[in-house]
């Protein structure tokens, strides 16, 4: 469990052999595991010539992106210009769709299977572009002096995990963009409701991460922790609503879930908002449903699936049927239809 991470990390620092199970595919790819006892350090760095090539390729995409954003009510003035800010060096854990994309945004050290986080480059960001289940192994393997540089990009409810590992103050980001396949152009979460984009980041490495996304022509809002938490819970609500309703009603996409079952979606969003407010004391800004519906339109073809239960729907499920009756009933409906890839408690 995550509470064992500190003990394992201390054992590792005393040169004891600690085999570590790690997963390095990002949230959009299927999980795979490996066992490492003698990890090596990767040396992939983006060279200036390659950066120029990437910038040139990105520049060619700006015209098509501007046309795409205009169709959503976003003016050219809202679109971020390529190269608006320079990016600094960062380490990226994971070379899947998200990790590979981020590596194109500036000088990077990309860590893949069997690679270790180096002790040097302290004070520069370490972007974790892996599945949630990778996190404990990554923390165990991380040198003590680099723990504060870890930047968590994962979906879901991370509060308890970060608290148990003493990392509550680390940088975190909410990614509201998608990458359909390796090297595909990312689709930004720009909507007519939020032309500034929905991606947000907070913490000591917030500016560095935002600048990297700017270099990729993706929008990112740097916010304080007080503003980050409602946004984090809104994304959790989006995932736990559209994926669950779509799965229970056997929809092919989140777009279909929103279109064919809008009444259930709206009722569930309100239910989960109320549960978060009661449990966390968080007051959401007006317009939650409008923001989530507009984002759904942008990613309408994304398939529905209830997964990573521990990090997502479990947060609401554990509140009980009194607090989340519709949510829990839909989960049980999925269980009855054998639509869950895990055992519902």
Image: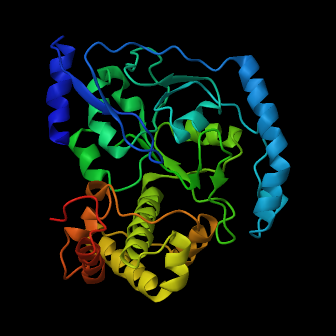
Compare residues 267 and 171 and report the one nearer the observer. 267
How far from the left and from the top, in percent, is residue 98? 54, 41
Q: What is the total number of numbered labels drawn onto the structure image?
A: 0
How far from the left and from the top, in percent, is residue 162? 28, 44
Q: Is residue 283 visible?
A: no
Q: Is residue 69 left or right of residue 228?
A: right
Q: Is residue 261 left or right of residue 271?
A: right
Quadrant for the C terminus in the image? bottom left
Q: Is residue 238 left or right of residue 259?
A: left
Does residue 275 sit above or below 211 in this rendering?
below
Quadrant for the N terminus in the image? top left
Compare residues 165 and 65 and report the one nearer the observer. 65
Furthest residue in direction front, as rendered = 338
Does residue 168 sit above or below 112 in this rendering?
below
Q: Residue at x 61, y 72 (%)?
A: 294
Res 267 → quadrant = bottom left
Q: Residue at x 19, y 65 (%)?
A: 344
Compare residues 87 and 178 and report the one nearer the observer. 178
Q: Is residue 115 visible?
A: yes
How far from the left and from the top, in percent, is residue 265? 44, 81
How far from the left and from the top, in percent, is residue 153? 45, 44
Res 274 → quadrant = bottom left
Q: Residue at x 56, y 75 (%)?
A: 293
User: By what rule are the colours in the image chosen?
Assistant: rainbow
Q: Is residue 230 left or right of residue 167?
A: right
């Amino acid at each position: 469990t995550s509470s064992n991470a500190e003990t394992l990390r201390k054992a590792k620092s005393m040169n004891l052999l600690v085999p570590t199970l790690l997963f390095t595919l990002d949230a959009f790819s299927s999980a795979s595991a490996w066992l490492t006892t003698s990890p090596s350090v990767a040396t992939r760095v983006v060279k200036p010539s390659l950066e120029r090539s990437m910038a040139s390729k990105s520049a060619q995409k700006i015209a098509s992106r501007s046309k795409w954003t205009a169709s959503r009510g976003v003016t050219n003035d809202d679109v971020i210009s390529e190269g608006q800010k320079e990016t600094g060096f960062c380490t990226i854990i994971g070379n899947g769709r998200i990790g590979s994309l981020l590596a194109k945004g500036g000088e990077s050290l990309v860590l893949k299977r069997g690679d270790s986080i180096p002790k040097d480059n302290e004070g520069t960001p370490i972007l974790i572009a892996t599945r949630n289940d990778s996190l404990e192994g990554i923390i165990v393997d991380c040198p003590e002096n680099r723990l504060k540089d870890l930047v968590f990009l994962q979906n879901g409810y991370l509060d308890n995990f970060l608290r148990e590992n003493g990392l509550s103050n680390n940088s975190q980001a909410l990614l509201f963009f998608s990458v359909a396949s390796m090297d595909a152009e990312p689709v930004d979460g720009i909507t007519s409701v939020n032309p500034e984009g929905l991606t947000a980041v907070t913490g000591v490495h917030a500016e560095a991460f935002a600048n990297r996304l700017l270099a990729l022509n993706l929008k990112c809002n740097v916010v304080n922790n007080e503003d980050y938490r409602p946004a984090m819970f809104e994304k959790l609500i989006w995932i736990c609503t559209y994926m669950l309703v779509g799965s229970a009603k056997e929809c092919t996409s989140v777009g279909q879930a929103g279109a064919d079952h809008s009444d259930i979606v709206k009722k569930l969003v309100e239910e989960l908002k109320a549960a978060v407010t009661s449990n966390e004391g968080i007051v959401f800004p007006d317009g939650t449903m409008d923001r989530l519906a507009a984002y759904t339109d942008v990613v309408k073809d994304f398939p529905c699936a209830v997964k990573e239960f521990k990090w997502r729907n479990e947060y609401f499920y554990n509140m009980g049927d009194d607090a989340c009756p519709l949510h829990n009933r839909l989960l049980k409906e999925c269980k009855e239809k054998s639509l869950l890839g895990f055992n519902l408690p």
